[in-house]
Amino acid sequence: MTELKLHEKHLEKYKSGYPLIFKEAVIGYQLIESSGLEEGSLIKLTDEKGKYVATGYYGKQNKGIGWVLSKNEKESVGLPFFQKKLYSAIEKRLGLYNNPKTNAFRVFNGEGDGIGGLTIDFYNGFYLINWYSLGVYAFKSHVIEALKKCVEFDGIYEKLRFEGLESEHPDGFVTGTEAKFPLVIKENGVSIEVFFNEGAMTGIFLDQREVRRAIRNNYAKGKDVLNTFSYTGAFSVFAALGGAKSTTSVDLANRSKEHTEHNFALNQVSLDRHQILVEDVFNYFKFAAKKGLTYDLVILDPPSYAKSKDFVFSAEKDYPELLAEAIKITRQGGIIVASNNSSTITLEKFKQIIGKGFNIGKARFEILEIHQLPKDFRAHHLYEESNYLKVVFLKRIK
């Protein structure tokens, strides 16, 4: 096991249980990196005198160079370790496993459940493992064997969310029975299509489950709804089932239209009052303003970073302008659901971004409610970035 010494100024943070190993915390990291340390290597973190602090693994990703696994020097990182972590995580999700109206949720959430760089989601009998670095992928055999011991399953799939290596399995299938895509899942009684064979995304963002329910139950009835960056239209379907007068779904991706149509059809909702447009959101804002189109409920859930033919969108830089454009077509007394999933933007910073957007839009607002990650997306109490989701329901009062 390779020993890495921690700088004195970061020592207390790691003694308290901080999960991310970042290079600035490690003494002489440049020399260690050039020494050819292999990703997946177990590392022993010590103070400058060599006294044990924690055990972790070396795995480079955009957040850091690895994750802490244990603060017990005698704990072995083998199959029993992973089985214990998975079993503990599954036990915390028993309420969701027993929910007849929902069969898609997160089972294991990285550092929140004790293994950074690894997530596992459940989709109606199938498990999807996401590996975020070559380092955590080195433990693949242990993780899969542990999962097989802890749960019953139809099939297990994987997605490699790091560069330089592709899954050795077609469509990421690992073991069990292969799924027939699209696979239909239920979320709070609503049917949605998912697929593991169309790139990194699966057709639904599971972390927005409570937001979709709030829109259906509390905000949609009788409203004209605009869903921007609509992807497969899940927000629109929930709004329609909540009694929306109309919905308009706007997304630049061509495939979004077909997926959205399928999700409406799955829930026996006619498209008579529901429009699906393949269009750049900023262009649609200009079109709507020009035509005098306005909405009671506008949903803004942009990616942290997106690139179209004419424009590069960065949430931190461009969200205020996006919000200002949305305000122009939101009726007075209307609701804007502003969402951000960047781990580098805190809730307080996002509130400042919202304030800036309303200043640009020359409007005032009232915060009605705030959502962050649901309970199955367990965050780490010492690592603020792990609670990345921020969704603010805003009422336009002027």
Image (spheres, rainbow, N blue to C red):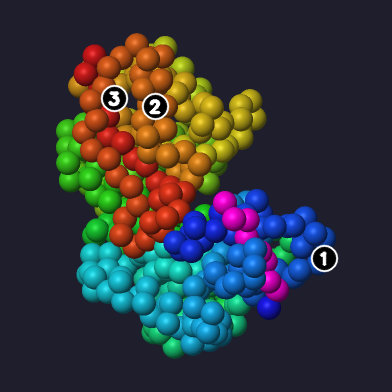
Q: Closer to us: mark 3 or mark 1?
A: 1
Residue type highlighted by circle 1: Ser
| Disc 3: which residue | 295
Horizontal side of 214 relative to 373 (left or right) equals left
Of helix, strand and loop, which one carries label 2? helix
Q: Is residue 58 visible?
A: no
| Disc 2: which residue | 352
Horizontal side of 125 relative to 213 (left or right) equals right
Of helix, strand and loop, which one carries label 1? loop
Q: Earlier in the sequence, mark 3 or mark 1?
A: 1
Q: Position of residue 141 (x, y in %)?
A: 59, 82
Q: Closer to us: mark 1 or mark 2?
A: 1
Residue type highlighted by circle 3: Tyr
Q: Do tag 3 and tag 2 residues touch (Cβ < 8 Å)?
A: no
| Disc 1: which residue | 35
State the extent of the magenta-drawn residues as a range.
2-9
Q: Is residue 357 above or below residue 131?
A: above
Q: Closer to us: mark 3 or mark 2?
A: 2
At a point 31% along the width and 55% down the height, the residue shown is: 374
Crowding at mark 3 (Cα within 10 Å: few <14, some 14-19, many 20+): many
Q: Earlier in the sequence, mark 1 or mark 2?
A: 1
At a point 64% along the width and 71% down the height, the residue shown is: 50
At a point 51% along the width and 61% down the height, the residue shown is: 14
Q: Do tag 1 and tag 2 residues touch (Cβ < 8 Å)?
A: no
The quarter in which the C terminus is drawn is top left
Of helix, strand and loop, which one carries label 3? strand
Measured in 3D between alpha carbons, the distance from the residue under mark 1 to the one under mark 2, in whole angstroms, is: 44 Å
